[in-house]
Image (cartoon, rainbow, N blue to C red):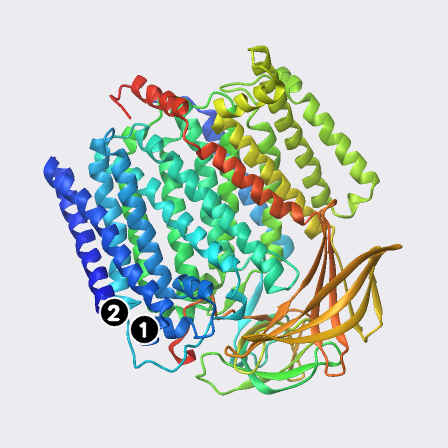
Amino acid sequence: MARKASPARLVIALAVAGVLAVFLLYTSIAGGGNPSLAPSELAGRTGDVQLAGRVVGPIRGDSHAGGLRFRLEDISGERRTSVAVLYTGSVPDLFKAGRDIVVDGELQKGTFVAQPGSMITKCPSKYAPKSDSA
Amino acid sequence: MPELGRAALLVTLGLSLYALVAGAMAAHLGRRRLARSAQNALVASFATTVVGAAVLLAALLRNDFSFTYVARTTSEALPTAYTISAFWGGQEGSLLLWLLVLTGFGAAAVSLNRGWARDLIVWVVPVFAAVSTFFAFLLVVVASPFATQAAPPDGAGMTPSLQNPYMLAHPPLLYLGYVGLTVPFAFAIGALLSGKLDERWLIATRRWTLFAWAALGVGQLLGSHWAYVEVGWGGYYAWDPVENAALMPWLAATAFLHSVMIQERRGMLKVWNVLLVLLAFSLSLFGTFLTRSGVVNSIHSFTQSSIGPWFLAFIAVVVAVSLGLVFWRLPQLRSPTRLESPVSREAAFLYNNLLLLALTLAIFWGVVYPMVSEALRGEAVVLGRSYYDFFLRAFGLPLLLLMGIGPLIAWRRASLRSLGTTFRWPTGVALATGAVLLLLGAGSSVPGLVAYTFSAFVLATITLEFVRGTRARKVLGAASWPAAFGSLISRNRRRYGGYIVHAAIVMLAIGVAGSSAFDTVTEAKLARGDSVEIGDYTLVYRSLDENVTANATEIRASLAVRRGDRDLGVVRAGKNAYTVEDQVSNEVGIRTDRLTGEDLFVIAEQIDPDGSVYFRVFVKPLVNLIWLAGLVFLLGSLITLWPDRREQRRLVARAAEAGIPATP
């Protein structure tokens, strides 16, 4: 039994096509996001990445003059490699040694140079505290 | 005491299981007394959950650190109000709150509706029971709030940014919203199971859905305001997965609230509505999962989280079973009517739904993308702010426009000529507004300009509707204009309350566009006596004070603010150093211009030992419209929620017309 074509189907088809077109448009101009890496995965990477790690002291310098220098190690703690980070711009309240943070930037001559103001601390409050932090 | 808590939760689990098994058997075999017994078990499970919650609350108030949960979330020095808010500050406590609200809502929704929709309710009970069994199981077996330990001398305290009045209201409101969406879900599944697929499940749950949706909306705005005044980075929404967790079910529920009207009016979109309810409920579970499992950090933390896998499994079961049921009942869900024209109110609502859904899915994709890419490519790829902003504009701006078109366009089929007359004025107003704004220099942000033009269009249509309606009531014999206006709203709360909510969304759009597309920012390191200029403001750094309170040391920089020759007083920004928690928090200074809704927002980013301070200063035009929108949103929601006998009678009469004997 042939059903009469309904405008509803046309509308839905057009809408789906429209949404797909927008998705394609977006991916073609913005090209997706940055890979998120741990310090141990950073070696040899070029280009912008997001680096997530645990802050290792000492923390030196001034983030508004010359830059803040510290090291980041893997949050999982499995591998003991760490990477030097140079950061300028706003420093979140929760930033200190032992905290987990995320910064955007790229590796330049062995130092991870972060984009100004890109630091985010992983908010410990909103998630279930890990047993070791109690 | 902890034994009592554990026992109460164990009994809750038992009662829920009984309500599930007995309720399902009773519904299947048609045993009326057994069904009644299952309903009573559901009500009783609320009582036992109250006991469990009372035990935890008492332990918190007594600072009983032999409860692991209490020791982890509070300290002796913590003020009482925040000790109470610690109830939902951790994983176990928030799960208990979920269960408490769930059993409470379940008991109320079932008791209120069993008189007039008995054949439906018998199937709704086991669905509620299934959800509460899951949460009770988690609380008994996986994440008990009543775990004990040798009491330490003091607790670990609460994160300073959570020591804030907002945290007394924001999380509970979100939970009311998340859990409230269980009610329409349970009724929808109950309707599918029973095969009674008439509109009664919609009538029974309309207010519940509205309530849950309003609570989610207000809860999110409170959260944004908290982020704005307390977290202190100069924004109010960061597309954080935890924020998106609440936005997604709200968007899905918004779509549902609209498409429901099409089903009530024209009997269309039945499958679609069931799917939207399912989506909203799954997203509320997913939201709880996101905030509570730690999976947002990385897929690796997923395995460390105790409840994550359980939640994911539950969501999978919910989705699979519900989709199976929809498929099974598909023949009965076929609509008697169909869309007649792509230019009609039905079609406008359908576009609105598709856009809301597209926005929801785009956000969902952004949230899960890091996990998907990590699973597929071994490398988590994070989608940034620009991704979300793009989709907010691509789907949000057309939605804004539709908000003006949808309510005015004719049902079934609208002619182009009638469209011309209906929208002549609003279009004129919108174009004029756009032109004026362009001359004033708003062309610096095209999305911002478009948002303003569309906003003017929607506000014009809303005003037009109110003017027309009020005039009609006056003609019909209202004593005065205010009386006519009042009776207009009270006689059709749903419609005019809805318009007020629309006005709130427009205000929100104007505020967001103003503060994000037309804001300015500057940074400067100032010694005492130095000044910085931003826009037409001049700020002079005067002094630095230190003040020691019970649980923190407060440092504040005072800045004198001038605009032109006018002295606007002092803004104070600084930091608090919390002693017990060993943390520092930014305390921003905000000066609000009450006339224009503009904020001058000052962050003291870095305070050097020599007394010089690195300041970051924003000027955010119209940002206060966002908070005002929250109040208007609440007002509109309350109007639509307010009990309305006339409306209820209309709905029931319509249901009766369709051949269902119904007496509310």
Query: Residue B387's x, y, as percent?
Result: 59, 55
The quarter of the displayed image where residue B603 is located = bottom right
Q: Disc 2 or 1, which lies upstream in sequence?
A: 2
Host chain of mark 2: B
Host chain of mark 1: B
- Separation of residues labelled 2 and 1 (CA atoms): 8 Å
- Tell me the residue that label 2 is attached to: B2
**Where's the N terminus of chain B, which quadrant?**
bottom left
Q: Residue at x 28, y 69 (%)?
A: B146
Q: Is residue B343 visible?
A: no
The quarter of the displayed image where residue B454 is located = top right
**Where's the C terminus of chain B, which quadrant?**
top left
Q: Mark 1: which secondary structure?
A: loop
- Which residue occupies the foreground of this view, B573 or B451? B573
How many other residues sit within 10 Å of disc 2, few (<14), some (14-19) or many (≥20)?
some
Q: Residue at x 21, y 39 (%)?
A: B123
Query: Residue B56's x, y, as percent?
Result: 32, 64
- Which residue occupies the foreground of this view, B557 or B497? B557
How many other residues sit within 10 Å of disc 1, few (<14), some (14-19) or many (≥20)?
many
Q: Check if mark 2's residue and mark 1's residue have beta carbons within 8 Å.
A: yes
- Tell me the residue that label 1 is attached to: B67
Up/down of B606 relative to B226, above or below: below
Q: Mark 2: which secondary structure?
A: helix
Q: Residue at x 47, y 38 (%)?
A: B255
Query: Residue A46's x, y, as percent?
Result: 63, 75
Three-letter code for the amino acid on which mark 1 is drawn? Phe
Left or right: B215 in relation to B586: left
Three-letter code for the amino acid on which mark 2 is drawn? Pro
Query: Residue B411's x, y, as percent?
Result: 50, 20
Up/down of A83 relative to A36, above or below: below
Left or right: B157 in relation to B198: right
